[in-house]
Image: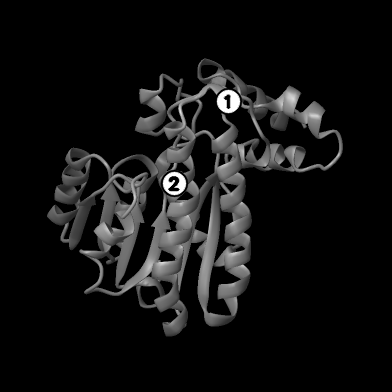
Amino acid sequence: MDLAKYGPWALIIGGSEGVGAEFARQLAADGFKLVLVARKPEPLEDLATELRSSGAEVRVVSADLSKPGVLDQVRTVTDDVEIGLLVYNAGANNTRGNFLELPREVPDSVIAINVLGQTDFARHYGAPMMARERGGIILTGSLGGYLGSPTLAAYTAAKAFSRIFTEALWAECQPFGVDVLHLNIGFTATPAMARLGMPIDMAEPPATVAREGLENIANGPLWIVSTPGNAERARMLSVADNRGDLVRAHAIRPREETGKAAQEMKDMVGNG
């Protein structure tokens, strides 16, 4: 990763475990100084201790990204440094249910993290990058953003917003030398997925996802992680005709069926 173009500091939102932690490890190995933001303080401190032991300079912020004022909270440790790379990796969904039956705080939290958070952080940290005419922004998304799925209405809609927003931001920033990438992630073996009880033996390793994001930041606006079946599924779900049939046939399955669905997609690709 080019420290001169994207450094000296990288800000990783959702940076305590899984893909975010792998972003941090790989960037630290390339000489970046790091600001890590996540909700749980213990994993943050554990990762910071690991990275500091290897010589990296690391700052941490324990913050709930669904709450108002989170950007101001993060600014308390970034206003005195130059953030050349923003990685916004937060946005997992931990509650499923019919939208009209869920408590309002559930979709509000999803929208706050995936929509308002991405736009607020991209605006604040992207503007100085544009003025300097260098820097990079990676906003992570999901294959879930290609299709509305029952029991995941706000989540799938928010992921669709993220992809379209990133494409527009990429077009605006490209003339100013700022790289913007929507990193479209499929089924990945993260601790968050494991806590939800999902079978992760068929999932992509987080290190692979982070590496592909960093290696392709200049290949925006969209990079679909190369897990077998990811690109094929995205193409299949992007057609305009028969959307009702697509939603009924290809909605995101219950968590306990995720591993089976991933294997079926890999088998389909292998036989194609």
Classify the position of the C terminus by image quarter: top right
Relative to 156, does residue 210 appear above or below in the rendering? below
Residue bearing mark 1? 100
- Which of 6/192 is in front? 192
Residue depicted at 40% across the width and 23% down the height: 196
- Closest to the camera, between mark 2 and mark 1, is 1
Classify the position of the N terminus by image quarter: bottom left
Residue depicted at 71% across the width and 39% down the height: 232
Residue depicted at 21% across the width and 45% down the height: 44
Hey, which quadrant is residue 205 in on the image?
Answer: top left
Number of the label disc, if any, that sits on residue 112 = 2
Residue depicted at 49% across the width and 44% down the height: 111
Q: In this view, does 173 lie to the left or right of 39?
A: right
Q: Give the x, y percent position of residue 170.
A: 59, 67
Q: Is residue 110 visible?
A: yes
Q: Give the x, y percent position of residue 80.
A: 21, 74
Give yes or no for contact between labels 2 and 1 (Cβ–Cβ under 8 Å). no
Mark pair 2, 1: CA separation: 18 Å
Q: Is mark 1 on a helix, strand or loop?
A: helix
- Mark 2 or mark 1: whose residue is earlier in sequence: 1
Q: What element carries label 2?
A: helix
Number of the label disc, if any, that sits on residue 237 = none
Residue most extreme to the right: 241
Q: What's the residue type where badge 2 is placed?
A: Ala
Q: Can residue 226 be seen in this view?
A: no
Residue neighbourhood size for the residue with mark 2, other residues' Cα within 10 Å, grouped as few (<14), some (14–19), many (≥20)? some
Residue neighbourhood size for the residue with mark 1, other residues' Cα within 10 Å, grouped as few (<14), some (14–19), many (≥20)? few
